[in-house]
Image: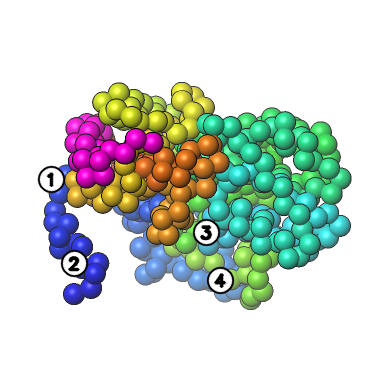
Amino acid sequence: MSGVEGLLKQHGKPIKDVYLDWENGSVVDKEVLDVMIPIYLEKTFGNPAITHKIGWETYDFYVKAKTAIAKPLSVDPQTLALTHSFTESNNLAIKGLLPLNKKKKKIIVSEAEHLSVIHTAKSLFNQQYHVDIIPVSNDGTVNLDVLQEKLDDDTLLVSLQTTNHELGTMQPVKAALEIVKDKSEEIFFHTDATAAFGRVPIDYNKLEVDLATFNSNRILGPKGIAALYVREGIKMKALYEGQLSVEILSPDVENPALLAGFAKAVELQFSKFDQVKENITRLRDKLLYGLLTSIERTEMNGPSGERRAPDNVNISYLGCEGEALTVECSMNGIYVSSGSACTSRVLMPSHILTAIGRKPEEAHGSLLMKLNRLNTEEQVDYVLERMPKIISRIRSITGGIEL
């Protein structure tokens, strides 16, 4: 028996299962799966770049599906480049600009960006690029004064999230964009909108960013497909070489089933957008403030009210250790993450929590919970009933060390 099998056997079956780790993994909505299965089996399964009946049918479907994805974003479907993940989209947004813009050598990102942005930018050091990482406030808001100071004639790209994936901080993207474009219209502006997509209503045509990243599985669509909005007129190069395909920036055979799932997920997420957003916000507030008021020595991470994404609950439980917390929560059927998923297995504090001033021990004792349209009031009530007991037990084991 492997170590994991032993853990699962010891774990047993909880009274109730409440999944709140939507940041790190997601089911596919059944209605999404229902539109994907027939494509795998019987129709529009071909290569849309091929000139025969199946290819033409697939291309016709491909155009309609991309149009459905683009509609709630208020962008032209031809400006959406399909990719295999939001990580690929973020890499493409940065590295895809370089071959055709070789004179400028500075890239600016915030210290609270997703690691797929930070690591991509830092990887360019050995290519003689300079990367400025600008600070954020204690609620995760990017410092616009520092942004303005860092802009110069050598700046190629600024990349700032629409919404922070870990803190829920809704960044002043429009104000940042105005600062950048006032400096020079030739500076590209990218926003990783993964944590905002389907949660925050934004007209990306009016916002006038140059590049924006979106992802399917964050709205209960399939993994393996995402998109990068590339404003009309911007020239980019693909990250890799491949066969002729409809998607120039992702040279591979398009996957119609994944595209169908992405389009259906967009339809479901946006068809009752206001109603879903209102309900999730209500559940978020109930969960967030219920935990803060029922458990002593807690600190909320990120902003409150309308400046916080409607799905985000992030709290540090002082005197606790994150891995012990996630295990104890799991034993009670509550599935959450500690710090960021990208660093959890190496036991390093979240770079975002340390960026807002949390001590390593405070960061380690944080839990991230996210809500979506599948979560219920009954589930939130169960979490609020169980969490004080979970925290009390962990503190009794660790001695509740004062931080």
CA distance for labels 3 and 2: 33 Å
**Number of the label disc, if any, that sits on residue 6:** 2
Q: Residue at coordinates 35% horizontally, 56% vertically from top-left?
A: 33
CA distance for labels 4 and 1: 45 Å
At numbered mark 4, what does the secondary structure look like: helix, strand or loop? loop
The boundaries of the magenta stretch are 378-403
Of labels 1 and 2, earlier in sequence is: 2
Task: Report the residue marked by disc 1.
Answer: 15
Which of discs 4 and 1 lies nearer the camera? The answer is: 1
CA distance for labels 2 and 4: 41 Å
Tag 4 near tag 1, CB within 8 Å: no
Which of discs 1 and 2 lies nearer the camera? The answer is: 2
Which of discs 2 and 4 lies nearer the camera? The answer is: 2
Residue 292 visible in the snapshot: yes
**Number of the label disc, if any, that sits on residue 85:** 3
Disc 4 crowd, CA 10 A, few/some/many (<14, 14-19, 20+): some
Task: Indicate yes or no whether the magenta region holds residue 124.
Answer: no
Of labels 4 and 3, earlier in sequence is: 3
Identify the main secondary structure in magenta: helix
User: Which residue is at the front of the view, 363 or 146?
Assistant: 363
81 displayed left or right of 356: right
At numbered mark 1, what does the secondary structure look like: helix, strand or loop? loop
**Number of the label disc, if any, that sits on residue 253:** 4
Q: Quadrant of the N terminus?
A: bottom left
